[in-house]
Amino acid sequence: MHKGSAVVHKEDDQVSLQAIRAAARSLGPESGVLRSPLVPAALSGQIGVDVLLKLETLQPTGAFKLRGATNALSRLTGDAARRGVVCCSTGNHGRAVAYAAKARGIPATVCLSSLVPQVKVDAVAALGARVVRHGASQDEAQVMADRLTAEEGLVALPPFDHPDIVAGQGTIGLELLEDRPDLETVLVPLSGGGLLAGIAVAIKALKPSVRVIGISMERGAAMAASLRAGHPVEVTELPTLADSLGGGIGLGNRHTFGPCRDLVDEVILLSEVEIYRGMRWMLLEERMVVEGAAAVGAAALLAGKVQPRGPVALIVSGQNVEMAQALAVGRGEPVTLGDIIVENRS
Ligand SMILES: *Cc1c(COP(=O)(O)O)cnc(C)c1O
């Protein structure tokens, strides 16, 4: 039995295509969410098939998480909307919740541990969210979020394991097929699986022949390990260039493990050097500043880990990278991540 096995993994019904279509209606032009462009990649020439980039980097918060957060917030009414929402992410989800809540006049609380650097705290506060600092780890901050849910009646908005979040991210799948009905393959960065589950539900419902492939880093791939085990398991979180892909899927996962198990064709794992080369390609050849997490599609193609069958769409999921890291990668310099150094040696 693994650690925490008292938590029961009990799946809910899969998010439906109808729910994703409804999410698409609430993410219209007035919503603040961009219907992102799908543009040809320089990578096409290198790989020999049509490669397309879905530019979620252009969302106002710099990442696709604005879709799920906006959809979830748009479904809140009455008392729940008045009391507001709570989450505990410093990353792209926290930003998205703060931004979308402000746009709708819904109070948002973001719980952060004392380890979170002040710049990130300030960034969330600047978006108008109430910041509550508690504990010395993400888990302890989560305890505070749970307490506020119970005591203040706030609505908890987790980063992926929520039907409205999954449906919001799934709108990307609808847009891909609207723009390119001839799509054959889609490469999706994979962490908790909200993005992959949503896209897989939409695409497999509309065009089951499209290959839907999830991509994580070798260092701490929680969904890949869970799929191998047949149920959600915990993995050790390690520093990685794809930092937005870190963290677990939750031992009590209800909404993303099932669709990833049932609908996804393949999950690919990348080394840090492969991710480095993906980021470098995105910067130097595609001329885009992207996070490691957003470069995994390009990285997988460059590493020869996906049989290219085009047209291939890559979800370029976010741009919120430390600029010093992006510049170091662009210059071909080594990057230190905790206990490891990533070098671009060939
Ligand atoms: C959250 C995130 C992911 C992974 O999304 P999941 O729904 O957790 O799988 C990928 N890329 C970026 C930039 C993210 O912020």
Image (cartoon, rainbow, N blue to C red):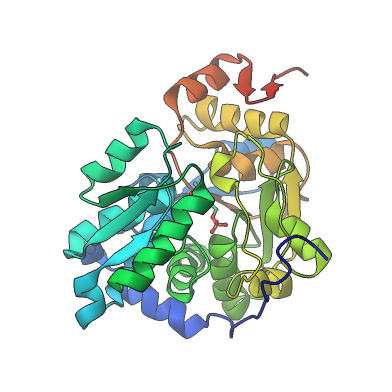
Taking the view exactly as shown, the residue that stands out farthest to the left is 105
Q: In front here: 245 or 345?
A: 245
Does 331 sit left or right of 10 as displayed? left
Q: Is residue 209 visible?
A: no
Q: In front here: 126 or 55?
A: 126
Quadrant of the image containing the N terminus:
bottom right
Q: Residue at x 58, y 31 (%)?
A: 279
Does 159 sit left or right of 76 as displayed? right
Q: Is residue 344 above or below residue 291?
A: above
- Where on the picture, by quarter, is residue 214? bottom right
Q: Residue at x 45, y 52 (%)?
A: 141
Q: Residue at x 70, y 42 (%)?
A: 301
| Image spot of residue 339 (x, y percent) | 69, 24
| Image spot of residue 305 (x, y percent) | 78, 45
Q: In front here: 231 or 21?
A: 231
- Where on the picture, by quarter, is residue 280? top right
Quadrant of the image containing the C terminus:
top right
| Image spot of residue 151 (x, y percent) | 32, 71
Q: Residue at x 28, y 68 (%)?
A: 28
- Where on the picture, by quarter, is residue 343? top right
Q: Is residue 141 above or below residue 181?
A: above
Q: In front here: 107 or 327?
A: 107
